[in-house]
Amino acid sequence: MQKKKKNQILENIRLLSAGAKGVSVGKTEDGKTILISGAVPGDTVNARVKKTKKNYIEAESIELVEKSPYRVEPQCMHFSVCGGCKWQNLSYEKQLEFKQDEVVNNIRRIGGVVDFEISPILGSEERYFYRNKMEFSFSNARWLTLEEVNSTEEISDRNALGFHIPGQWSKILDLKECFLQEAPSNDIRLAIKHYAEENRLSFFDVRHQEGFLRTLMMRQNSRGEWMVLLQLFEENEVQRVQLLDFLLQRFPKISTLLYAINPKGNDSLYDLDIHTYYGEGFLYEEMDGLKFKIGPKSFFQTNYKQALELYRKTLEFADLKGDEVVYDLYTGTGTIAQYVARNAKQVIGIEAVQEAIDAAKEHAALNGLANCTFYCGDMKDIFNQDFLKSHPKADVLITDPPRDGMHPKVVEQILNLSPKKIVYVSCNSATQARDLAMLKEHYNLVRILPVDMFPQTHHVENIALLIKKS
């Protein structure tokens, strides 16, 4: 039996295009597809083989032989270590081109649909500093560089406030800068770390489950108001009050300041009691005259400006005349449902998370939308024949499922419901294409519009318009 070669190096691999999850795609000398991380399309690289599959090879770039003409200088000093913005070294124009190609190729290859209108991808006005929510972790065992690991000198500064290193959950990258959230996000984070070290506040130890400071969340609205939430592993009232007072004094833009005590084995927020130290405990956001109340546990699109464009385009695709019954599947907090409600006779939203449905009802009341009705339940269970019999028939159906796409039972019920028009919003064009394949016998895919919600990453949204066949 032939043994697998260890540390096999493939030389002078020319990368031709972008593949799924941001890898670059090339061919070996014998024509086998190779997926390479750590490079951009157009590069020629030497790569170390990580996995060999039947139809392709996975590898990582170890040496850049020839630079791609599409390469640009990354903005952030933490690029390649952080793992958050893997396409910072690729020109934005090419990012958009590759994202659109991915959507189109998925629909044609996976969905088996060839003939449809392709609207040019909608790029983001902000290419950096576009996120309205960021989360960071404290650690007393920060990630060390290779030079630090190999050093014989003792390393004393082990505290970190930043992101988890991909594949190394217990290690936190100590962030000096981040280009995802606007000012004063960086200043607040750095000030908290400096204050904590000056005042000897303990950073969380994930292995021993001890320490004081655990996580930091910041979110802001379009009016420049800020929410800051500190998650503490244990209560220490004196230290907590002093730290929170410091933040309020130093940063007047903080509109509401919150904290939570979390002694659990994980950082999840959904089951914690959130305490309001200052302010109302929430922010308001407005979108074309609609008002939304955003709390620390609320889901809200993290790229506000591009989300607004996404909703505008969804409404444009729906092309409502005012007399239609609209179903909104996977409605979340009802943002899309309420955005289209002003142009519809009635909107029925369905969502699995009770807290999201509660927020949707609250927002509908806040916006005076009496024509919105929301139901909570697992989509494949609640969206059934009994539901369809007891509710008005939909003229238009909007669906915005999670990355896994729609359950086959949900697709089956959509076919039973048989709306004239479907607007399918997706954050994963591969699962969207799979669902389109199940719908194509009864619906024509008329038009798609990819939307870039997350510049500098490989992620892309897509809106698809389907019309029932006559």
Image: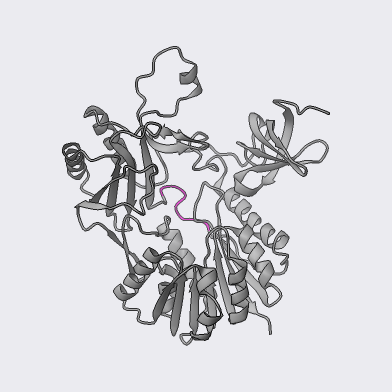
Which quarter of the image is occupied by the C terminus? Answer: bottom right
Q: Which residues are magenta?
A: 123-129
Above or below, comparing residue 371 to residue 258 in the picture: below
Above or below, comparing residue 245 to residue 101 in the picture: above
Residue at 23%, 40% in the rendered image: 235
Which quarter of the image is occupied by the N terminus? Answer: top right
Task: Say if residue 165 shows up in the picture.
Answer: yes
Residue at 56%, 45% in the rendered image: 91
Specify the quadrant of the image occupied by residue 343: bottom left
Residue 370 included in the magenta stretch of the image = no
Horizontal and vertical percent for residue 20? Answer: 63, 49
Residue at 50%, 43% in the rendered image: 85
Check the image and name the residue furthest to the top: 152
Q: Is residue 307 left or right of residue 368?
A: right
Task: Say if residue 256 shows up in the picture.
Answer: no
Camera-nearest residue between 454 and 357: 357
Q: Is residue 453 left or right of residue 37?
A: left
Q: Is residue 152 left or right of residue 241?
A: right
Q: Is residue 157 left or right of residue 21?
A: left
